[in-house]
Image (cartoon, helix red, strand yellow):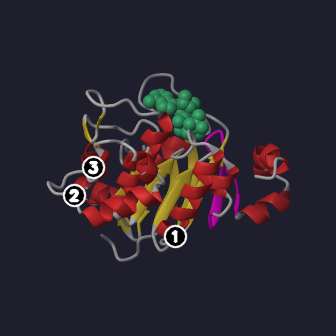
Amino acid sequence: MPLNKTIKLQNLSFTYPGAGNEPVLSNINLNIPEGKTTAIVGMSGSGKTTILKLLLRFYEPQKGEIKIGAVQLGQIGFRFWRGACGIVMQDGFIFSDTIAKNIAIGGEYPDMQKLLHSIKIANINEFIENLPLGLNTKIGAEGNGISQGQRQRILIARAVYKDPEYIFFDEATNALDANNEKVIMENLEKFFKGRTVVVVAHRLSTVKNADNIIVLNKGSIVEQGNHIQLTKNKGEYFQLVKNQLELGN
Ligand SMILES: Nc1ncnc2c1ncn2[C@@H]1O[C@H](COP(=O)(O)OP(=O)(O)OP(=O)(O)O)[C@@H](O)[C@H]1O
């Protein structure tokens, strides 16, 4: 891994493969500084998830570059890169296995201390403790049904357990009630410290503490800054969040 961990997107444009597709991202220039939290906001379809998918190398950009420090992302081994990333995407997968194995992916014997820490940060400890089999409860295709919010919290616990350098969250808490979300965001704030984090979210409470907020509109960056600056600007960010501001979120 390069010493300098800042992610740089330079003149990045992207069109999904297939005839007739319009560019989804046009000429994106963006710095995602090492050790900071960067939030991406914008209307539905503006390209937020696509940026994450490019950072995670689901796709290769047709134009422009993604660099980690001075190194092209494409030159870092795929498995090595993914190994350094904690990911919660909207279609994150739950395996047909125990809760413990769903959180501590890969290892034969989960580290109990780390496991308990992860479920606490993801605020799912109470739910798990109330199950007769606790962490050994089977979930997934052949196991117990879980709600969308429980699923999201298990995916968050998985990312925390991994203890990664990079974190990519795409609407990781959108299925949670406001109280649960507040607790998790407060816990995550500590966990995010010193890591390089990108969060995509519509909820103001999720983005307002980010060091930098990127506003996307139809595949272009139209504004960036922190919550206070952007609220003062009364530009696109303000338009996006003003209903939530009035509600006092
Ligand atoms: N696999 C795909 N093939 C073709 N077009 C796609 C594909 N995935 C997304 N798109 C298009 O790319 C554009 C950006 O999608 P993206 O998911 O990045 O938006 P978003 O800002 O994350 O939206 P949302 O807030 O609704 O999740 C949309 O117009 C979408 O229809």
Marks 3 and 2, Cα distance to the nearest angstrom?
A: 7 Å
Amino acid tagged 2: Pro
Q: Is residue 203 magenta?
A: no
Which of the 4 image quarters holds residue 42?
Answer: top right
Which quadrant of the view contains residue 213? bottom right
Between 165 and 4, which is closer to the camera in this rendering? 165
Q: For label 1, count other residues whose C-alpha is less than 10 Å away and answer few (under 14), some (14-19) or many (20+).
A: few
Indicate the position of residue 103 as horizontal and vertical percent values. 31, 50
The nearer-to-camera label among 1 and 2 is 2
Q: Is residue 214 visible?
A: no
Q: Which residue is mark 3?
A: 100
Q: Amino acid at mark 1?
A: Lys
Q: Where is residue 11? Give x, y as percent.
A: 53, 54
Residue at which label 2 appears = 110
Q: Is residue 85 left or right of residue 32?
A: left
Magenta residues: mostly which secondary structure?
Answer: strand
The relative height of residue 196 versus residue 206 in the rendered view (above or below) is below
Q: Which residues are magenta?
A: 210-225
Q: Is mark 3 within 8 Å of ligand 1?
A: no
As drawn, the residue found furthest toward the bottom would be 3
The residue that label 1 is drawn on is 190
Secondary structure of the residue carrying tag 2 is: loop
Q: Do callouts 3 and 2 mark residues in contact (Cβ within 8 Å)?
A: yes
Q: Residue furthest top?
A: 19
